[in-house]
Amino acid sequence: MADESVWVNGTATSGGAGRSVAELVEEVSDRQTGIAVAVNQSVLTRAEWARTILAAGDRVEIVGAVQGG
């Protein structure tokens, strides 16, 4: 069986290939606002999350905005 891993914030996550970015964000984050996502160094708009399907080896960065001073 082929490796279906995707990299999320620098960590290999098995079984990620074939899922949408929206599904991945829902799984790994407890937030739905204030989040930015990049796949293979390309920043996605929120509208692109549901239609962007991850492939094995993709590198995903999920970052959340924080307030503070």
Image (tube, rainbow, N blue to C red):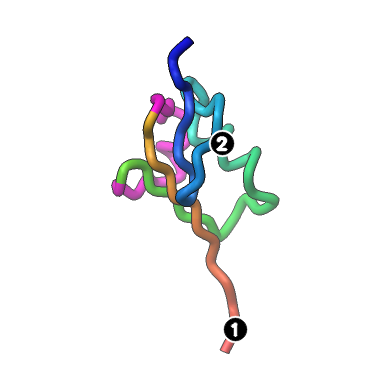
Percent position of residue 15, x then y: 55, 24
Can you tell which quarter of the image residue 54 is in? top left
Q: Is residue 50 magenta?
A: yes
Q: Amino acid at mark 2?
A: Leu
Dot placed on the residue nearer the N-terminal end, 2 or 1: 2
> Which of the two residues, 47 or 55, is positioned nearer the viewer here?
55
> Which of the two residues, 4 or 34, is positioned nearer the viewer here?
4
Label 2 crowd (10 A; few <14 / some 14-19 / many >=20): some
Percent position of residue 12, x then y: 50, 39
Which segment did they paint magenta?
41-56
**Which residue is at a point 57% across and 42% down the rendered structure image?**
25
> Which of the two residues, 51 or 64, is positioned nearer the viewer here?
64
Q: Classify 36 as above or below 46.
A: below
Percent position of residue 23, x then y: 58, 32
Q: Amino acid at mark 1?
A: Gly
Q: Is residue 67 magenta?
A: no
**Which residue is at a point 55% across and 29% down the rendered structure image?**
14
Q: Which mark is residue 68?
A: 1
Cα separation, mark 2 vs mark 1, equals 27 Å
Discs 2, 1 touching: Cβ within 8 Å: no
Q: Classify 61 as above or below 12.
A: below
**Which residue is at a point 38% across and 31% down the rendered structure image?**
57
**Which residue is at a point 46% across and 44% down the rendered structure image?**
46
Q: Which mark is residue 24?
A: 2
